[in-house]
Amino acid sequence: MRQLLLFISIIAVGILFLSRLFYLQVYNASVHNLFEDNAIRKVYDYPKRGFVYDRDGELLVANQPSYDVMVIPREVEPLDTLEFCSLLKIDKKKFIDTYKKAYRYSPRLPSVFVSHLSKEDYAVLQEKMRKFEGFYIQKRSLRHYQTTIGANVLGDIGEVNNAIINRDPYYRMGDLIGKQGVEASYEKTLRGVKGIKFIQKDRFNRNIGPYKNGEFDTIPEQGKDITITIDAQLQAYGELLMKNKRGGVIAIEPSTGEILAMIAAPTYDPNLLVGRQRSKNFTRLLRDTIAKPLFNRSIQGVYEPGSPFKLMNALIALEENVLNVTDKVTCYKGYKYGNSFMKCHCNYGARNDLITGIQKSCNAYFATAYRKILDNNGSATDGINAWSKHAKSFGLGKFLNNDLYVGQKGRIPDRDYYKRIYPKTFYSTYTISNAIGQGEVATTPIQLANMTAAIANRGHFFTPHIIKNIEGETLPEKFTKPKYTTISKQHFEPVIEGMLQVYKKGTAASLQVKDIDICGKTGTVENYAIIDSVKTQLTDHSIFVAFAPKDDPKIAIAVFVENGYWGSRFAGKVASLLIEKHIKGYITRTDLEEWLLKHSLENEYAKPYSGEPFKINGETSMQIVDEQEYYQLKKKLNQINKSQ
């Protein structure tokens, strides 16, 4: 029995030794465990990031070489810190703080010590790196913007933080990632895949060559190039028109849902967020909490839509069969309900049908239409839910499921929403402001542009998107499959005719462009702010939506200009010029162009902070740009026209 026990023990010990030997020679040689082996140095080979082109093949974003000084804290030996700091152009405190941060991250893993060295600094430092054990230079590429436009579209890249590293093991301290815009939306496409080399070290921590002759080394996979839907020339022109103004502009190609221009004003030069000054410049932009240049108003700005929303109410009224095209409503310069009065600019006693109601933007007509929709079945609860369902079918009140990095849902209320305010009784007059696109209705510029594209298409739209082509891939079906609204096709023609009459003889008659049938709708929205705990009325917002040409739409657009007085004052001019620029390729309405370049709204934006008395919609607050700035704007305009 003892002999058997001894034999079994010997066999068990042998199996244990063999298992351990197998583990060390086979399993422990796997790539996974190479990362844990302190005797092997890991050197990453970063791929070039994919290029970004505009819809016409113009290169917008390329790469430039960059050099980072990396540190492995446990390998650092005593060094001449003064000399090292001098070479790196940092002070000793920065050296100590950065070293401590790297040590906290990991004593044995590399992290960035100083990023984005210039070629000149790299050339000087490389010759002396042998003196500084534990430090080495890592080559990678930074973005090289070939343009000064589209910062909110293109975005930028920056270092990952601990939260990103914990969420995605692909990234390590010092890696770069898309932070905003296209760079963020298509990060995995653009970044490529890192390569890695495993270097064997001896007992003195010296490199002695590739581990196992490079058997486990991988080569980097370059990021894929992408083509975006933006028209760079149209984008540049729109940004110029929005100079000295705040707001958002979205232009869409109705037949595809491709975004032709995405303008957020104010904007900034994307080159500010490249290189060693990135952190400083980003902080400066972030701390500008008044102008908010990092805030993409075209997709994040939530505004009451104003009168353009009347188009939606017209379509719903026709679909619900509560009004027909020829039904007339009498307007007494507005609409009276209870003790309130919703005024408008119609002549006293005017009789408006659907087309003239849109043409004149008659509040009485659309307040009547809205009440009829809600009271259609004798229950305002059923009516508000039906109204909400129709509006949401146009993409309003929800995320559009697009490929843009950020966005807002906006708001299209229903009965559940109003139960918080009116838990028991509910009547159509309670929410009458929705009739004219105010009250609880809220939209983003991209949602209104998408609504306009759906009208242009007579009842369907394609999800707005920024990607046109990815190298070697096809677009997702969600961008190529049409989505249909709940409104029957025949109801769109009278609404479109009303929009055409807005330009022919309505509220945008002064903005007509020769040889282009533009269908549009002006909007003016009241604007309030809390100043010193007091609700204060500021100058109204200017809003405009349009598409053109009427029978073969090439562009649908929504323009919001904050504190822009009224719809045709600023927003209508911007929209008309962008439409002409896109369709004709040149501008005939140079009078509108000159006016926009000359007029600034900076005084309006300064009002809440100046302590000056407010003059709502007063001409006295209009600001004319100085001669030197006007000259610079004209120079940029000429450059855009020459490159067309």
Image (cartoon, helix red, strand yellow):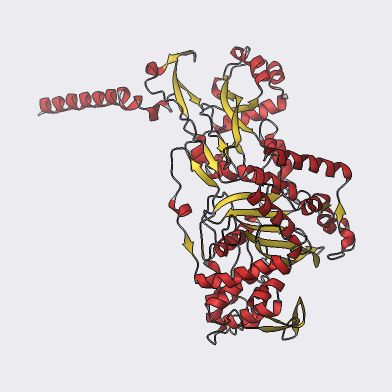
- Kindly tell me whether residue 319 is visible in this rendering: yes
Q: Is residue 161 left or right of residue 573?
A: left
Q: Is residue 36 left or right of residue 632?
A: left
Number of callouts: 0
Out of 146 and 114, give the one closest to the viewer: 146
Whole-percent x, y for residue 27 in the image? 32, 27
Q: Nearer the viewer, residue 592 or 287?
A: 592
Q: Viewer-proximal residue, 220 or 18? A: 220
The percent coordinates of residue 500 (x first, y second) are 65, 66
Q: Is residue 172 left or right of residue 624?
A: left
Quadrant containing the N terminus is top left
Asked whether residue 506 is in view, the answer is: no
Rendered view: 74 above or below 429: above
Q: Position of residue 23 (x, y in %)?
A: 30, 26
Residue 249 against residue 187 in the figure, above or below: below
Q: Which residue is most to the front?
A: 515
Q: Residue at x 80, y 53 (%)?
A: 591
Left or right: 346 in relation to 499: right
Give the residue at x 60% y 74%: 314
* Residue appearing at x 61%, y 25% in the figure: 66
User: Where does residue 629 sit, x and y in percent of width and height?
Assistant: 84, 43
Relative depth, front residue between 639 and 533: 639
Quarter of the image for residue 78 reads top right
Q: Which quadrant is home to the C terminus?
A: top right
32 w.r.t. 154: above or below: above
